[in-house]
């Protein structure tokens, strides 16, 4: 994985994303994960959580509205960590944004707390192939609709039911599971950290297996919304049929087929079809151009403590799909536009199927690497399977999808060659009147287009240096996470900032927040942008400072830039 050396990561280990007490100064060199007993008692109820096979050395996170959560109170100088176990019976109501109807996302009463460790099947059925939703055969589409229909017909108390499957996302994005005894704000998070990708992969796996069992077709495979290809950029037709079990009324009425998704959506007054060239450049920037694991996945659970967590480019790319699909007439963008309600829309799972596919492509085609850290690989989740058994799984077990019995249908990747071009050359920039820019006065309230310079620690690095360390532009952003927010980041831009688009190389990226659990305004997140190649393309690698322009696109709540800095991430050895 990549490691960060930055003032932004000093003494920031606290609050809602943290596995460590705020008094701890985190040291990677001393990070460890310890073996602990799984027969740990809940401090509040004095009830044992019986985990099969005794001891383990992982971070246990219960999921599905029907799971169990645990974490470590961490001291990097101690030999062992003490587990904090939350029994599913102690689940609290979700922490929802203003205007949301109160809903019970916690599990119904269950008969047993026994958990079985996941075991790979000794005999897999024929490998399941996840196909683009717009390329399903009539029979495949019929099977999918029938499976969702039967899932909807199950009792809401059934862990396989449509209601309980939707509650998975609600409970773990809106603070239902409280880690009793933690000295930091004690909620489990599966967004804005490295748990995003593995959590959702397991979520889809069990969802897919439940659907397959309901129609008695072991080879059933969940399709994916192929929004990274022009042929699949509109909402697939099977989701737009009002007579279908796949239909959801709470979607943006202006974004129905044949309107293309806009991966750079700015919530314009008049919605138009997305620009497929912009979309392809956006995917290129967030997938093909990313080298560091930290940048792609987000910061690790402990390093990304409450004062400074970070989502990766994979999650940032996916965020706009949520906001674009949700109903703008609802105060919180239900269903897809808010994480507590997103699982109620069947398209959510196909959206995430494509996200999971892009993770696979990043690794297989662009030499991306999963984190080697034990505290990543041993992080674990609990799901109910198709037989209503509570099963414990680890991140490490899902890193190779073939072991889970599925793969993705190969389709062309037009975004692979959609690298944006610079709008101006260095000579053209130098010919323009100089712009007087100063370092930002931080913290900076981002309520209008703002330009400033960020000093670089080093310039004109050698190819060998760049191969070892990626240059990263890092912002620490404070905001109300229950509100949708977007701002664009431009580098060395010399034209009207509102005209910049992903087709311009100066368009470095976009920070996009989708409504999830409200938080106190002092909590912040990091937004990271890899810039080594970008600076070369802009002929700016010999500059002492980076000219930055921030362009607010939507969000009526205050957004504050606490810090802006350039740091270096150490790149692990790559195969290419």
Image (tube, rainbow, N blue to C red):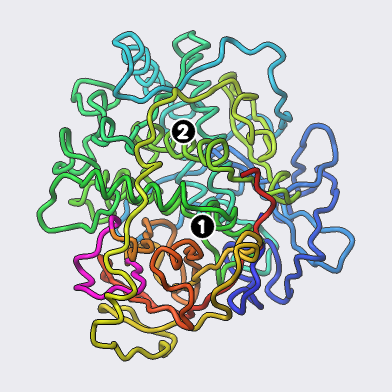
Residue drawn 62% across the image and 59% down it: 467
> Which class describes the residues within 10 Å of circle 1: few (<14), some (14-19), or many (20+)?
many
Q: Position of residue 561 (x, y in %)?
A: 42, 78
- Check disc 1 and report the residue beneath it: 192
Task: Decide which of 100, 123 is in the foreground and name it.
Answer: 123
Task: Decide which of 93, 389 is in the foreground and name it.
Answer: 389
Q: Is residue 486 left or right of residue 388?
A: left
Query: Residues in magenta?
Result: 488-503
Q: The C terminus is located in which quarter?
A: top right
> Which class describes the residues within 10 Å of circle 2: few (<14), some (14-19), or many (20+)?
many
Res. 158 mark: none
- Check disc 2 and report the residue beneath it: 165
Residue 324 visible here: yes
- Is the residue 525 above or below the residue 437 in the image? above
Q: Position of residue 406 (x, y in %)?
A: 55, 22
Residue drawn 73% across the image and 44% down it: 378
Task: Decide which of 38, 271 is in the foreground and name it.
Answer: 271
């Amino acid at each position: 994985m990549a490691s960060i050396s930055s003032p932004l990561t000093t003494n920031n280990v606290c609050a809602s994303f943290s596995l460590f007490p705020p008094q701890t100064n985190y040291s990677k060199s001393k990070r460890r994960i310890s073996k602990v007993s799984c027969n740990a008692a809940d401090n509040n109820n004095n009830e044992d959580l019986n985990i099969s096979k005794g001891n383990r050395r992982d971070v246990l996170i219960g999921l599905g509205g029907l799971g169990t959560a645990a974490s470590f109170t961490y001291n990097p100088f101690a030999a062992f960590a003490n587990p904090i176990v939350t029994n599913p019976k102690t689940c609290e109501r979700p922490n929802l944004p203003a205007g949301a109807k109160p809903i019970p996302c916690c599990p119904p009463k269950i008969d047993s707390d026994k958990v079985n460790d996941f075991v790979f099947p000794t005999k897999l059925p024929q490998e399941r192939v996840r196909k683009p939703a717009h390329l399903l055969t009539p029979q495949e589409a019929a099977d999918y609709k029938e499976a969702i229909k039967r899932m909807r017909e199950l009792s809401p108390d059934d862990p396989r039911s449509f209601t309980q499957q939707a509650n998975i996302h609600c409970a773990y994005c809106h603070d239902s599971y409280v880690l009793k005894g933690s000295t930091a704000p004690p909620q489990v998070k599966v967004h804005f950290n490295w748990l995003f990708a593995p959590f959702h992969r397991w979520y889809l796996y069990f969802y897919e297996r439940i659907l397959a069992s309901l129609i008695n077709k072991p080879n059933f495979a969940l399709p994916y919304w192929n929004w990274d290809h022009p042929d699949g950029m509109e909402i697939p037709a099977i989701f737009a049929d009002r007579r279908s079990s796949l239909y959801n009324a709470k979607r943006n009425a202006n974004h129905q087929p044949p309107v293309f998704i806009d991966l750079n959506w700015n919530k314009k007054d008049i919605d138009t079809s997305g620009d497929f060239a912009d979309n392809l450049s956006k995917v290129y920037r967030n997938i093909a151009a990313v080298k560091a694991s930290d940048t792609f996945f987000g910061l690790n659970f402990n390093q990304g403590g409450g004062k400074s967590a970070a989502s990766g480019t994979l999650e940032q790319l996916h965020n706009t799909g949520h906001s674009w699909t949700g109903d703008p007439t609802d105060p919180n963008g239900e269903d897809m536009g808010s994480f507590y309600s997103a699982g109620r829309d069947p398209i959510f799972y196909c959206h995430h199927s494509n996200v999971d596919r892009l993770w696979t492509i990043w690794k297989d085609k662009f030499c991306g690497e999963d984190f080697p850290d034990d505290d990543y690989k041993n992080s674990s989740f609990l799901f109910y399977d198709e037989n209503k058994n509570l099963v414990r799984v680890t991140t490490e077990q899902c890193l190779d999808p073939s072991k889970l019995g599925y793969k993705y249908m190969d389709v062309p990747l037009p975004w692979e060659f959609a690298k944006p071009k610079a709008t101006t050359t260095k000579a053209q920039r130098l010919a323009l009147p100089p712009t007087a820019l100063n370092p930002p006065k931080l913290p900076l309230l981002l309520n209008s287009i703002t330009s400033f310079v960020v000093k670089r620690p080093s310039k004109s690095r050698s190819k060998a240096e760049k191969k070892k360390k990626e240059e990263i532009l890092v912002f620490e952003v404070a905001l109300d996470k229950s509100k949708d927010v977007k701002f664009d980041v431009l580098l060395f831009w010399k034209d009207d900032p509102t005209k910049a688009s992903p087709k311009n190389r100066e368009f470095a990226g976009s920070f996009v927040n989708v409504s999830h659990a409200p938080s106190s305004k002092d909590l912040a997140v990091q937004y990271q942008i890899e810039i080594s190649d970008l600076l070369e393309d802009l002929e700016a690698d010999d500059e002492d400072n980076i000219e930055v322009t921030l362009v607010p696109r939507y969000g009526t709540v205050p957004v504050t830039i606490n810090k802006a800095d350039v740091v270096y991430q150490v790149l692990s050895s790559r195969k290419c």
